[in-house]
Amino acid sequence: MAKTYKIAVMPGDGTGPEVVAEGVKVLDAAAAKFGFNLEYTHFDYGGDRYLRTGEVLPENAAEELSKNDAIFLGAIGHPEVKPGILEKGILLHLRFALDQYINLRPVILYPNVDTPLKDKGPEDIDFVVVRENTEGLYAGAGGVLKKGTPDEVAVQESINTRKGVERCVRFAFEYARKRNKRKKVTLCGKTNVLTFAFDLWERTFYEVAREYPDIETDYAHVDATCMWMVKNPEWFDVIVTDNMFGDIITDLGAMIQGGMGIAAGGNINPEGVSMFEPIGGSAPKYTGKNVINPLAAIGAAQMMLDHLGETEAAAAVEQAIRYVVAEKLESLSAGKMGYGTDEVGDLVAGAV
């Protein structure tokens, strides 16, 4: 009997519904070919719902989402909603509530895609960032004293626990082993300045590393990591880092792989429900014009299939993306692809 996966679909804001539709199209093509079923439940969480009801998320949102095998997210961000309300109220809230403690970001340069890095190609840019996703500066610890006065004080604390650091580091080593490419894990930190937090990270990293003698280890300060990502990206296989540094270097990664139009990511709870999304945001100026690039959303769908254990289907979707990028598209930029959003989805689904 064919296996059925329950997928929560959150199209979100702006161009989110457009790219999600193409991701679902490709998911359905993969399911039909590889003999499994997908059962979708749609959730209208996002800016329009907030403006209509005044509620960011209902109280039972995390509980309802946790009944699914995975979450497929389009984008969160609305031009009529103050920045931070939706991002913190939906994205950060769900990451914490569902304990999605890993943010997984592949940095892959596909064939025929321009990178700003001189003399670098697909063989050089192929690594993964494993970012801790529920602690650090994003834990929200701190406060403000005497706000709005000349004596105002603002404190934002980075919270790092042994449990949180160890499970993130262990995931990185396991992922490097599963990925089976360079079999190398680089810790990205700042041990020379952030001596308390990254003492914990460094000690944990090397203690866990002893359990993985087949994996090479490396360390780089975050500023050096940024330099080497530009100068020698081929040095990296799996980078593991904290929440803040991970947030920064993954955007740099998106640029060297060709831009936000191709960058996908996952918010992972290996023991629970995970959420997969394109990185580029809601891009409201392109809403409804059928010009946005859906490949990042399709890439997120591919990551979701791999996470669910449908490895053959995931490989077929990745190969289809590579084919369409290399052979069909004129550009990855919105409105310059040579095809409409829906046509790109058709091309990938057909290639699957």
Image: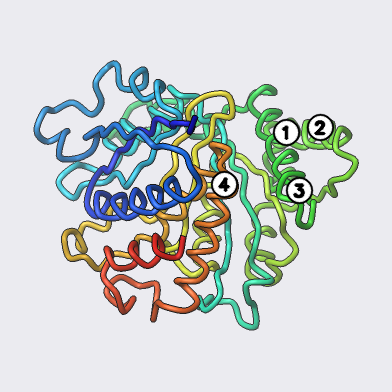
Q: Nearer the viewer, residue 165 or 320?
A: 320
User: x, y (%) of residue 251?
Assistant: 49, 57
- Relative image position of residue 9 (x, y in whole percent): 32, 37
Q: CA distance from mark 3 to mark 4?
A: 14 Å
Query: Mark 4 = which residue?
Result: 246
Mark earlier in primary sequence (2, 4)? 2
Three-letter amino acid code at the position of disc 3 = Val
Return the disc, 3 or 2, that comes first in the chain's sequence: 3
Q: Which residue is mark 3?
A: 185
- At numbered mark 2, what does the secondary structure look like: helix, strand or loop? helix
Disc assigned to residue 101: none
Cβ atoms at labels 1 and 2 below 8 Å apart? yes
Which of the 4 quarters of the picture holds residue 285? bottom left
Residue drawn where x is 50% and y is 47% of the image: 34
The residue drawn where x is 27% and y is 63% is 342
C-alpha separation, residue under disc 4 versus residue under disc 1: 16 Å
Res 244 → quadrant: top right
Earlier residue among tags 1 and 2: 1
Tag nearer the camera, 2 or 4: 2
